[in-house]
Amino acid sequence: MPKKNTPPPSDLAGARALLANLASAEAERPRAVCAMCGGVVHAGRDLVVGEPSFEDRRLDEERKSNGLPALHGWQRRHEACVDSVAVVRAITGRKVPAEVAHAALRAANPLVPVEGPFRRLALYAELRTTHVEDLVGWKSARPWAHLTDDERRMFADMVDEEAREHRLRNEPHRCTDGACGFCGVALALAWGESPLKWSNGTAAPACRDCFAVLRRRRPTRDLRLLRGLGVEMLSGASGLGLAEHFGDDMRVYADLAGDDHTGTDERWTYAPLLAEIREEARMLLPTSLPEPLRSEYTAKLADAREAAAARAAERREAERREELADWVS
């Protein structure tokens, strides 16, 4: 008669230990209600918020005898309710980045003091009383069932506003006043005011990169000086003489845009002459450039000076030979 396949004693002991641990976990963590969303947390699962007192246990035993899950002492929390992204999606149906979800919940969570026009988002634990069976959540056991439709809509509007602010901080966008009056770029991560004007007299904005240079310099409305600042923004070179050297040749985007303020896809691409001005400015003041441009243009300038000295020496030698030839002939 064939022998039955029986697991070795070590496997049986491990299985018994596992079952004992599961039973212990269920005893220590009975079926309860999530303190965040009001949905049922199954026995032995998810996170314990706090240990129950004697009175908490008595009230939960009373709830258990009425077929209700524990709530008073065994406050629990779904692991998913710790995830801001999951909470926002459960309440609003919106899938947003973690930064947006964190910001929206910080503004709405009643456990975090906030100021603003929004009503705070109620957590289920704040509603618990000795007569919890009168509340909405336990009857359906649906997460967030205690929130009204108006509260959900209000929170969804808050999430949408945070998402919009997040896009403005992290994605290039247009300015309502048009493209950058200096470099002409249409989209930027941030915008600032500038003294430039469009042809119709309205204000021309500055993109984030151009504005960073603008606010480091003394305020001016002198167009020649502003064009000199444009050379600095274009080339990265800075120092005395830029306005005097290029002021009559440089034209910023606001000078040329006319009635069309839509701008360009890239910075400093609105005129072919800009590449020549950029190169000349960097060669003029190479030591003012940031690295690695400083090393590159310092070496270029040294090469250019060496080449110029060699040409001057050749020219002088040619003149000397011509002078000698005149004496011989």
Image (cartoon, rainbow, N blue to C red):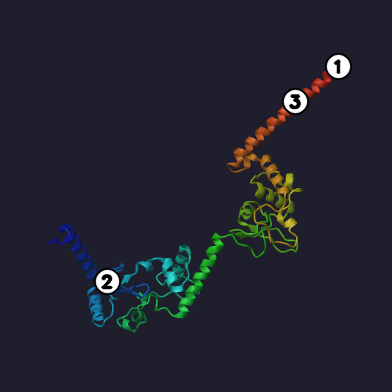
Labelled pair 3, 1 in contact (Cβ < 8 Å) = no
Outermost residue on the front side: it is: 1
The type of residue carrying mark 2 is Ala
Compute the Cα span from label 2 to label 1.
Answer: 115 Å
Circle 3 SS class: helix
Badge 1 is on which residue? 327
Give the position of the C terminus as an image quadrant.
top right
Badge 3 is on which residue? 314
Q: Is residue 113 visible?
A: no
Give the position of the N terminus as an image quadrant.
bottom left
Question: 162 above or below 289?
Answer: below
Compute the Cα span from label 3 to label 2.
Answer: 95 Å
Find residue 163 and name its label. Answer: none
Outermost residue on the top side: it is: 328
The type of residue carrying mark 3 is Glu
Ranked by sequence position, the earlier of labels 2 and 1 is: 2
Badge 2 is on which residue? 43
Res. 89 image quadrant: bottom left
Circle 1 SS class: helix
Q: Which residue is drawn at 71% across and 64% down?
A: 202
Ranked by sequence position, the earlier of labels 3 and 2 is: 2
Question: 68 above or below 217?
Answer: below
Mark 3 closeness class: few <14, some 14–19, many ≥20 residues within 10 Å: few
Position in image of residue 294 (x %, y %): 61, 40
Mark 1 closeness class: few <14, some 14–19, many ≥20 residues within 10 Å: few
Res. 59 image quadrant: bottom left
Report the side of 279 relative to 40 (left or right).
Answer: right
